[in-house]
Amino acid sequence: MLFPRAVLSVLALASCAFAHEMAVDAVKDAELYKSGKMHEMIMAKKFVRPYYIFVFSKAAGAYKSEQYPELGFVPCIDGLATAIKGDANNTFRCDNVDLYHFLSHSALGSTTGEGSSSWGWTSDDGREFIAFGQADGAAFIEILPEGKMSYLGRLPTYSVNAIWREIRAYKHYMVIGSEAQGHNIQIFDMKKLLTIDPKKPVTFDKEKDCTGIFKDLPSGRSHTVSINEATGFAYANGAAPRTSACKAGLIAIDLSDPSNPTSPGCASEDGYVHDAQCVVYNGPDTAYNGREICYGYNEDTLTIYDMTDKTAPAILSRTSYTGASYTHQGWLLDATYQEYLLMDDEYDEYDGAAPAADGHPVTYIWNIANLSAPVQTGYYKSSAYSIDHNQYIKDGVSYQSNYGAGLRIYDVSSIPRDPTGGGVKELGFFDVYPEDDGEVNGGVIDFVGSWSSFAYLKEYVFVNTIERGAFLVKRTSTSSGGNGTRKG
Ligand SMILES: *[C@@H]1O[C@H](CO)[C@@H](O)[C@H](O)[C@H]1NC(C)=O
Ligand SMILES: *[C@@H]1O[C@H](CO)[C@@H](O)[C@H](O)[C@H]1NC(C)=O
Ligand SMILES: *[C@@H]1O[C@H](CO)[C@@H](O)[C@H](O)[C@H]1NC(C)=O
């Protein structure tokens, strides 16, 4: 299923010294993206994992996560968090970020491992909980104030196991989708965790313990889910197959009664949506104030939708850019005033596409002041060698899960003043994947390490990893920067 690099480079857009927005390449869009070829290839890599097998050919397999011991507090000193002295696999490169706790997927109740996304919920009395994906289900933990994770139980996969399990919160519910055939979308009430004794973790019933299950996906599969709490809608994105009525676009799910989720419509017009952020608009394009706007990351374009009318959604713009290889995910710089967004492309590093040709993850900066004509104003690059994956922004700070380079934290609050990205600063990092540290470039361009993080917590950042398990980390108290974002 692998695409020879030569073919890709022929198809690649001409490189250019400066990244900028551009019109969609119609031929490439049809042959590589709308056909599903590009996405199939990337998903195949996550299954086959050629580099991984190469590195660990002699090992029993890194997914046997019981091999990774529990780790407690380890400060980051001179660039290293040395959890076990003399053990390279338990010595983590870091900067301004300390380790508080590590638990393997096995210790977190999984028999398969293969971690994916995560999201959190805070109870009325301030207790913090996380739901996170493993191939065999969603695991639940409480984050204790002293920086410990307490495993409370799990909601098993609805059908078969699959590494892709995407979770987002709607009020006190978690909305859980997966690429597993026949999975549907589980809606789980986190309040069920409030009374669990951590000495007796609970395995919930995949169906009976859900408040509701959305069963109207074409094959039960979805790639990601998005939530707009303000309107009470979830969106299932990338729901296979692409030939279905909604063409794997945005499928709106009405959550006003979480026990009876229903879909009033979908946006099929630009086909497959890999990920999206949907919000009620407030920003410079005042004609749209109060409308429900979705920012779609659509494989080769940033596609902006007006989803206010679910039965007749409108596409406001569809814009490609220099280096477009696989438009993957992004987040608004400030969701309360939508003037900029940050976006990652999952395949530009692998593909050697400018400006990511040197293998340093590129975050693209978009000015979206005009929703009909987004402008790419610049980008910033990670100092590490890896691929970038999900990023989320909190108070002017971007938390990126950059696969083998781990959690990377950037102060992006300068962007409204300097949209070129010239003022973006790395505040710190915690490299959860020491296995690739000895490689020529200090890392690998591959789908290993961290998939997603969750930083919307009082103090800590939760980091889910594919192979090992979950890390709880925190920026060192002496580090500074990243203080707030601009409000409109
Ligand atoms: C690190 O872990 C891998 C996988 O278990 C193993 O093959 C390798 O030998 C370990 N390296 C060290 C230095 O212990
Ligand atoms: C936004 O861009 C479109 C397309 O270039 C243009 O027609 C429109 O006037 C712009 N809107 C504003 C508010 O400037
Ligand atoms: C962040 O902003 C607050 C309020 O303006 C201020 O008190 C604090 O010192 C700032 N912190 C840093 C690290 O700049």
Image (cartoon, grey):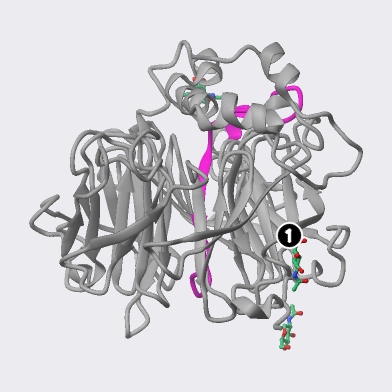
Q: Quadrant of the C terminus?
A: bottom right
Task: Tally the numbered discs.
Answer: 1
- Using the image, determine if residue 137 lies above or below residue 255: above
Question: In the drawing, does residue 374 fall left or right of residue 296?
Answer: right
| Residue furthest right as drawn | 17
Whether 406 is among the magenta residues is: no
Q: Residues within 10 Å of mark 1 (few under 14, many from 20)?
A: some
Residue 123 visible? The answer is yes
Q: In this view of the protein, which residue sits in the foreground, 205 or 18?
A: 18
Q: In this view of the protein, which residue sits in the foreground, 309 or 16?
A: 309
Question: In the drawing, does residue 185 fall left or right of residue 94?
Answer: left
Residue at point 58%, 24% (across, down): 31
- Using the image, determine if residue 283 lies above or below residue 429: below
Q: In this view of the protein, which residue sits in the foreground, 464 or 328?
A: 328
**First to last magenta residue range:** 434-462
Residue 93 visible? The answer is no
Asked which quadrant contains residue 88, the reply is top right
Residue at point 79%, 51% (across, down): 380
Residue type at mark 1: give it.
Ala
Residue 390 screen position, x and y as percent: 56, 49
Residue 245 screen position, x and y as percent: 34, 42
Question: In the drawing, does residue 417 fall left or right of residue 109?
Answer: right
Q: The residue tagged with tag 1: helix, strand or loop?
A: loop
Q: In this view of the protein, which residue sits in the foreground, 446 or 7?
A: 7
The residue labelled by disc 1 is 373
Residue 456 screen position, x and y as percent: 50, 69
Residue at point 49%, 46% (across, down): 273
Whether 457 is among the magenta residues is: yes
Residue labelled 1 has its Cβ within 8 Å of some atom of ligand 2: yes
